[in-house]
C-alpha cells in the first residue's frame, strides 16, 4: 500500500503546491492514501474549515496536527465535526477531537493514523507520548495491521527514540514540526519506516515558511514583529511509504520533493 505523508503545510504557498501537484503525484506514485500535517495551513498558524476543505478537495485524505492546532479558534468546533482532522492524541481527556483515525483504502485494507506530540521544548506540555502510543496500540482492533504515527516534536532525539520504541509495532514513525527535512529515512531492524522530520510544504525562500525580512527583524534587532507567511513558489515535501498490508511493516520509504509549476505570467506582445 502506498501512502504519501506530506510535511507541515504552511499557508497559501503550501496549499497551492498541493492543489497544483497532488493529483499528478497520486497517479504517478499509485497512491492509496495521502496524509498531511495541517497545523500551519491557515495563515501559517492553525486550521480553518475553509483551508481544510481546500486540502480535502485537492486530494488529502487525513490531516494530522500539532502545537498550532487551536491558533484559529474555529478549529475547536470544526474538529468535532470532521473525524479526518486529528489533533495530538496525548492532549488531556475532554479536549475536542481525537488523535486516532482509521482510514479504509480502495482495496479495503484499513490503516490507523496516530498523531502524537513530543514533550521536549514543546508547548503545551502534553502527557507522555510514549505512554499514549502504548495505550492507543493496546486499544487498536486486531484487523488493523498498518499504523502510521506522526510525532510532532522539536528535538531529533525524542523522535528517534519513538522510532526505536515502536519498531516492529507500527508501520512507520514520521516526525514533523521543525519544517526542515532530514535525510535519515530508513527502515528500522524490526520493519518500521522512520524519518526524523519530513520537512515543510510551503515557500522555501523563507525562514521555515515565514517572511525572511520579518524573521530577521526578530532575530537581529530583537524587536517584536508579527510572523507572516512568505510569498513565493510552493514546494511539497513528503515521504512515500510502502506498507505490507498483511503484516503491517514497511517495505520502502522515499523522500518526495515537488515544486508547483509556475504559470507563464509575462504576456508576449507581437
Ligand atoms: Fe509546523
Ligand atoms: Fe509545530
Image: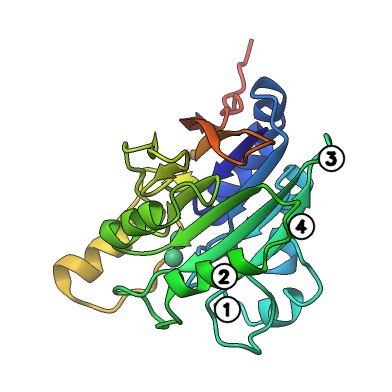
Q: Are marks 1 and 3 in contact (CB under 8 Å)?
A: no
Q: Earlier in the sequence, mark 2 or mark 1?
A: 2
Residue furthest to the bottom in view is 94
Q: CA distance from mark 2 to mark 1?
A: 6 Å
Image x and y of residue 18, in percent: 63, 41
Q: Quadrant of residue 126?
A: bottom left
Q: Nearer the viewer, mark 1 or mark 3?
A: 3
Which residue carries the number 3 mark?
Answer: 108
Q: CA distance from mark 4 to mark 3?
A: 24 Å
Figure check: 95 above or below 178? below
* Quadrant of the drawing holding the N terminus: top right
Q: Are marks 4 and 3 in contact (CB under 8 Å)?
A: no
Which residue carries the number 1 mark?
Answer: 70
Q: Are marks 2 and 1 in contact (CB under 8 Å)?
A: yes
Q: Which mark is residue 33?
A: none
Image x and y of residue 230, in percent: 43, 53
Q: Earlier in the sequence, mark 2 or mark 3?
A: 2
Q: Are marks 1 and 4 in contact (CB under 8 Å)?
A: no
Image x and y of residue 124, in percent: 42, 83
Which residue carries the number 2 mark?
Answer: 46
Is residue 231 in view? no
Amino acid at each position: 500500500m502506498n501512502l504519501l505523508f506530506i510535511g507541515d503545510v504552511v499557508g497559501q504557498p503550501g496549499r497551492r503546491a498541493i492543489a497544483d501537484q497532488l493529483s499528478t503525484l497520486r497517479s504517478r506514485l499509485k497512491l492509496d492514501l495521502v496524509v498531511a500535517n495541517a497545523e500551519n495551513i491557515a495563515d501559517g498558524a492553525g486550521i480553518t474549515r475553509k483551508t481544510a476543505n481546500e486540502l480535502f478537495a485537492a486530494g488529502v485524505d487525513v490531516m494530522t496536527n500539532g502545537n498550532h492546532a487551536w491558533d484559529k479558534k474555529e478549529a475547536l468546533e470544526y474538529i468535532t465535526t470532521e473525524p479526518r482532522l486529528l489533533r495530538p492524541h496525548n492532549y488531556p481527556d475532554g479536549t475536542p477531537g481525537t488523535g486516532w483515525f482509521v482510514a479504509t483504502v480502495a482495496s479495503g485494507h484499513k490503516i490507523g493514523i496516530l498523531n502524537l506530540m513530543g514533550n521536549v521544548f514543546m508547548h503545551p506540555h502534553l502527557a507522555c507520548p510514549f505512554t499514549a502510543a502504548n495505550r492507543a496500540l493496546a486499544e487498536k482492533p486486531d484487523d488493523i495491521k498498518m499504523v502510521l504515527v506522526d510525532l510532532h516534536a522539536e528535538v531529533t532525539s525524542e523522535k528517534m527514540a519513538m522510532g526505536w520504541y515502536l519498531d516492529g509495532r507500527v508501520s512507520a514513525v514520521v516526525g514533523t514540526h521543525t519544517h526542515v527535512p532530514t535525510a535519515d529515512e530508513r527502515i528500522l531492524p524490526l520493519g518500521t519506516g522512520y524519518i526524523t522530520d519530513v520537512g515543510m510544504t510551503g515557500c522555501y525562500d523563507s525562514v521555515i515558511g515565514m517572511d525572511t525580512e520579518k524573521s530577521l527583524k526578530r532575530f537581529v534587532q530583537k524587536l517584536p514583529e508579527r510572523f507572516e507567511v512568505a510569498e513565493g513558489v510552493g514546494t511539497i515535501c513528503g515521504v512515500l511509504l510502502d506498507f505490507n498490508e498483511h503484516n503491517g511493516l514497511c517495505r520502502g520509504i522515499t523522500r518526495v520533493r515537488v515544486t508547483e509549476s509556475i504559470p507563464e505570467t509575462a504576456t508576449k506582445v507581437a
